[in-house]
Image (cartoon, rainbow, N blue to C red):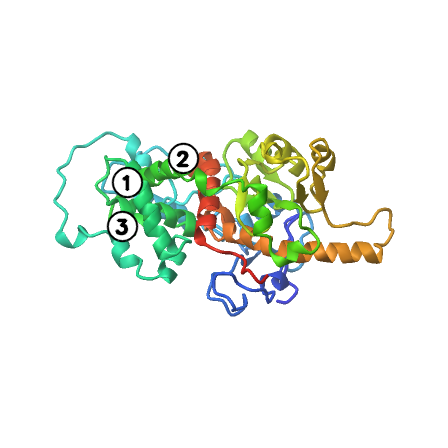
Amino acid sequence: ISGTCCVVRGCTNNQRRLWLDEQCFEHAPRTKRECSCVQRYTFHRLPTDEEARRMWLKNLNLKRPPKTLYVCSFHFVDKKPPDKKRRVLRRIDSSVSEEPSSTSVHSCDAQTQWVDPGMEEHTYSKGPIISCSMSTPSPELSHPVADGMLQSDADSLLYTGIPLVEFHTLVSCLQPFAPTTSSVPVVDQILMTLMKLRQNFVMADLARRFKTSQSQVSKTVGQWIDIMSEHMKDLIPWLPRETIRATLPQAFKEQFSNTTCVVDCSETVLQKAKNLDSRSESYSHYYASNTVKYVVAISPSGIIMFISDAYGGKCSDRYITQSSGFLDYLRAGDEVMGDRGFTIRDLLEERRVNLIIPAFTRKGSQLTNEEVTHTRRIAHARIHVERAIRRLKVYKILSQTVPINLVPKIDKILKICAGLVNLRGKLISSEK
């Protein structure tokens, strides 16, 4: 299926891009084809069931479908087409719940994505409260789960995104701010929160791993996202100009020695909301999905110095750059490196800041030799900085679909993930 590609308008995912031999930054120096990571996306054919087939064609707005039609997993809430059994499974799961569950059934339209019960907030908390006696935990459960789960740097990087020493340092710094209402050890509370950000595990999975209730996991993750975002702000510093100059990589020293930061815009897919206005505000034509967009400014050495709040996917890069407060950090004489899409030269010139972007052709004219050379140098310098953005997307809460119950906390999640990337350690070796 070498010619397989997604038919969704605006989506560029295809089989060739899926298996490009690029380096995997988690398991270097393996290539993606050799890597043990789960594929970023898969392809699904048009269903044979007549009703499902008609619904697919309606949503794809295709009157005359091609002979072989594929849709990539980016356009499904669970990375795969829903099946009819999901409704039955959800009713069974609700009926055997140990705690009372709401019995009302709400109708869903065809455009609303199915909700994974494990990712939902605990809906049964809205039902009647039944008092019960709390059993004494067994001795084998009194030890933190983190002690057995995190044995090495590899384990810590897998579940938290940071080395083991940095994880324990983070725990010791955050412990004084821990809520006193939970019986779960503080180290486990922080670990389950980082596991949600790093691997985007569903709440039911985390509840099973930490031997607690799903409601407790949901409450704990929400509380710690608030706490971490408040006390990890110092991990995203705007570096002084002298520090930036002293830590310039070799790729910047020769041609771009005055560069203050490299700015880029990134997007994260959201679970589709039921509210049509919310869908409209967050719809991205590039991803053909509902997304949030944010600006990231990175120092030449790879430190994330600024990350904006999340904006709707239909907002332009210029609007986000202007309204996010990024421009307030710049001083006269600074240089900002960006991509062709950043049409902010006039905004920077007002502050006497220079914009460095690759050259592009106008009206069919070709680039001169000097412009080609300049563009190559910019691309070479940006390689290391793009690795920092890839480190940010290592947190699957940002590279996969954000559950609907965590969308209100997306601004705080961005700040936490950026701080964790900076905490991870050196990105660029001194000789580069």
Amino acid carrying mark 3 in the image: Phe
| The disc label shown at residue 210, or none | 3
Q: Quadrant of residue 100?
A: top left
Q: Earlier in the sequence, mark 2 or mark 1?
A: 1
Residue at 66% x, 43% y is 336
Going from N to C along the chain, the mark reached first, 3 or 2, is 3
Query: Mark 3: which secondary structure?
Result: loop
Other residues around mark 2 within 10 Å, as few (<14) / some (14–19) / many (≥20): few
Q: Nearer the viewer, residue 354 or 399?
A: 354
Does the image show residue 108?
A: no
Q: CA distance from mark 3 to mark 1?
A: 10 Å
Label 1 environment density (alpha carbons within 10 Å; few <14, some 14–19, many ≥20): some
Position of residue 367 in the picture relative to residue 352 (left or right)? right
* Rendering coords of residue 394 (x, y %): 48, 53
User: As rendered, which of 95 and 231 lies closer to the eye?
Assistant: 231
Q: Mark 3, residues whose alpha carbon is within 10 Å: few (<14), some, or many (≥20)? A: some
Q: What amino acid type should be assigned to the residue bearing mark 2? A: Glu
Q: Secondary structure at mark 1?
A: helix
Marking on residue 409: none
Would residue 103 be found to the left or right of residue 387 on screen? left
Residue identified by numbered label 1 = 216
Residue 284 showing in the rendered view: yes
Mark 2 or 1: in front is: 2
Helix, strand or loop for disc 2? helix
The answer for how far apart the CA atoms under marks 2 and 1 are is 21 Å
Q: Position of residue 222 (x, y in %)?
A: 36, 37
Name the residue type under label 1: Gln
Q: Which residue is mark 2?
A: 230
